[in-house]
Amino acid sequence: MKVMARSVLVMEAITMGFALLLVRLDANGFELLLGGVIAIALILNSGLLKFKWGWWLGGLLQVAVIFYGLIITSMFFMGAIFAALWIGAIAVGRKGERIQAALKAEYQARNEAKGEAKSE
């Protein structure tokens, strides 16, 4: 789950960097600063996913990227795509973790059964 979510955040930060290249000609300093802060926050948050609040911050950053569409319109569309990828990373990751836990439990049960059979 973390690998896909981190990938989404880093790719989103790169996309924000490209958006800043588009905005730099028409935007004022605040709009550039805001975009830069969002891009840096996305990169930093990719390392904070080991904490539960890092996931909440990632969701909040998805909203921030969508609202950056008020400055550059294409970010509404790009933000929605990355928000969908973020939700997908969480959903697929949870499913993968459930499957991994079930396989681990099955493996441990099989090894315990072999251990009991050898001791008898």
Image: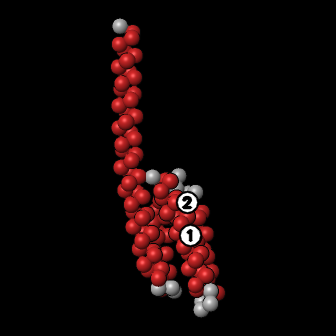
Mark yes or no: residue 65 visible.
yes
Instruction: Give the image location of residue 15, x and y in percent.
Output: 54, 73
Crowd rating for badge 1 (residues with CA inside 10 Å; few <14, some 14–19, many 20+):
many
Residue drawn 36% across and 24% down?
110
> Three-letter amino acid code at disc 1?
Ala
Q: Residue at the far right: name it.
A: 29
Quarter of the view holding residue 45: bottom right
Residue drawn 43% across and 63% down?
86
Residue drawn 45% across and 69% down?
82
Gap in angstroms between the C-alphas marked 1 and 2 = 10 Å
The disc placed on residue 79 is none
Mark yes or no: residue 53 visible.
no
Quarter of the view holding residue 44: bottom right
Instruction: Give the image location of residue 33, x and y in percent.
Output: 62, 80
Instruction: Give the image location of residue 6, x and y in percent.
Output: 52, 58
Comparing 57 with 95, the one in front is 95
Is 92 drawn above or below residue 26 in the view shown? above
Disc 1, disc 2: CB below 8 Å? yes
Tell me the quadrant of the picture where the C terminus can be found. Answer: top left
Comparing 56 with 46, the one in front is 46
Say which label, 1 or 2, has the lower sequence index: 1
Instruction: Give the image location of residue 97, x and y in percent.
Output: 40, 46
**SS of the residue under disc 1:** helix
Comparing 41 with 16, the one in front is 16
Specify whether 36 is left or right of 98.
Answer: right
Crowd rating for badge 2 (residues with CA inside 10 Å; few <14, some 14–19, many 20+):
many
> Three-letter amino acid code at disc 2?
Ser
State the residue position of label 1: 13
Residue drawn 55% across and 64% down?
10
The disc placed on residue 46 is 2
Specify whether 35 is left or right of 5.
Answer: right
